[in-house]
Amino acid sequence: MKYDVAIIGSGLGGLQCAYILARKGLNVCMLEKNAVVGGCLQTFRRGQSEFDTGFHYVGGLDDGQPLNAIFRYFNLMSLPWHRLDNDAFDEVRIGGQSYFFANGYQHFADTLAAQFPHQRDNLNRYVAMLKRVGDGLKDSFRPRTDTDVFSTSLFTRSAYEFLCETITDPLLRNVVSGTSLKMELSKQTLPLYVFAQINSSFIQSAWRLNGGGQLIADELVNGIRRLGGTVLTNAEVTELVESDGRLSYAALANGEHIEAEWFISDAHPAATLGLIKESTQVRKIYRRRIGSLQNTFGMFTVNIALKSGAVPYLNRNQYVYRTDDVWNLSDYQPEQPIGGILLSYRAAADDKSAANVDILTPMYWPEVERWADTQVGRRGAEYQQFKEQKAQECIALAEEVIPGFGAAIDRQFSSTPLTYMNYTATAQGAAYGIRKDYNNPMLTLLTPRTPVPNLLLTGQNLNLHGILGVSMSSFFTCAEILGMEAATDGLNFDN
Ligand SMILES: Cc1cc2nc3c(=O)[nH]c(=O)nc-3n(C[C@H](O)[C@H](O)[C@H](O)COP(=O)(O)OP(=O)(O)OC[C@H]3O[C@@H](n4cnc5c(N)ncnc54)[C@H](O)[C@@H]3O)c2cc1C
């Protein structure tokens, strides 16, 4: 059987593309190498406990906000979303002092202005900028407008320089950047658009999903199947085979061939090109270009099951820093101690205490590269020791906000960029895919098109990472097949 579209990888981007295309009546086939769908949305179980791997929270789900419209389109608003504290959805702790992020642009500015009264005007200018970027998001889905041009130009501006120009107090500059383990805060590369769009979305409103990111993936699979699509797991694509200048089929590890008119890859672009062994379309120069792109840092995660009732549930995230310059976290230095962590809580059945806490911190490829050729579960004692030491550093830093935390731990599990590399095939286990660089947006911002006319890319390696960014790219990728109007048919930002 020949499908209209075969999609490689069931991360959020792959699943959303399959859903959009199936909604327009195309016959789609989703191919996922793992036994479980979702990529970075996956949750995993250990005994009674369930943990998130990547995704932990999203922004902009209130009525009238951009992600709400996008999730309504995918029927994801019916999931058990839980709003974080309006007055303090995130807490940033720098130098032993806490600062709180409130929802709503003005509320956000007013809350921080209480601790930084001399910066009130600057905070107002800061949120005015974020609001403009957030409001402009929906215009990306329409023919080019002034706002769109404004957004595009923000890819060529430095996020750090914007902050230095806007906020004169260096501590406040760090505070407003302090929830940004959600992106790679690099003074040298981070485009203003990435910084502003992501921060803007969370300031609009911030939400956890009771039950974790797997629910998103499973609901999308249900939707794809309802719309007549096919979803295959344990279906690793080992080769994309070209004939007469177009891809003709995807060869699977089990020997099957999946034929299609179009192919969309949600896998990392370098991994995608690795699947095309022979091609008349993909020149060496394109392979070199993709191969030379830098990736963001990876993530070290400690998933912790707590003793019953030992830690109260906190309806916000906590970012705790050892460093006083949060923008230094993305600069790898050998043997450096952990500079900052994100703590995310999952409520127990009583809703008052925490069942689990996940701790996330950046981890750099050179730290784990020496084990790159080892297999999951067989990486050796030295790797276990390395993980244990990193986990202890994270737990020690967490003690600053949860006194006695170490004694409250029942069991803990940890993962490194190698784990992500193994499960999602992302180069170097990069948490947020290809690094976007404001110095070189033409090179580092990929479009869905590739030199092979019927192969498209999607997912976090294109414009913007994260749930919002990947969702945007899914529509842009499908627009290459359907046209923008048809791809966004049913996507309504106006109510
Ligand atoms: C630790 C961490 C925390 C995060 N926290 C948040 C958060 O709180 N909020 C937020 O908005 N974003 C967060 N993100 C980012 C967000 O999760 C990702 O941007 C998004 O989920 C990426 O989706 P994707 O579709 O691009 O790709 P991925 O999730 O990487 O999926 C790619 C899929 O392709 C499959 N695949 C690869 N090669 C093949 C092959 N040859 N054959 C078949 N299948 C293949 C993989 O198995 C995988 O399922 C986080 C990311 C990480 C890593």
Image (cartoon, helix red, strand yellow):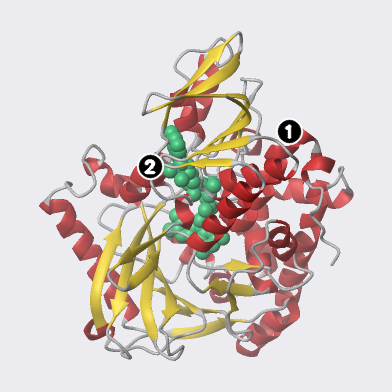
Q: Residue at x 25, y 70 (%)?
A: 412
Horizontal relation, residue 365 to residue 122: left or right: left
Q: Residues within 10 Å of mark 1 (few under 14, many from 20)?
A: some
Residue corresponding to mark 2: 428
Q: Which sits in the foreground, 214 or 160?
A: 214
Q: Amino acid type of disc 1? A: Glu
The local secondary structure at tag 1 comes to: helix
Q: Which mark is residue 480?
A: 1
Q: Is residue 137 left or right of residue 464?
A: right
Badge 1 or badge 2: first in the primary sequence: 2
Q: Nearer the viewer, residue 147 or 359?
A: 359
| 439 versus 191 height, above or below | above
Q: Position of residue 87 (x, y in %)?
A: 62, 86
- Please name the amino acid that badge 2 sits on: Gln
Residue 397 placement (x, y as % from top left): 32, 76
Could you say whether the residue bearing mark 2 is in a helix, strand or loop? helix
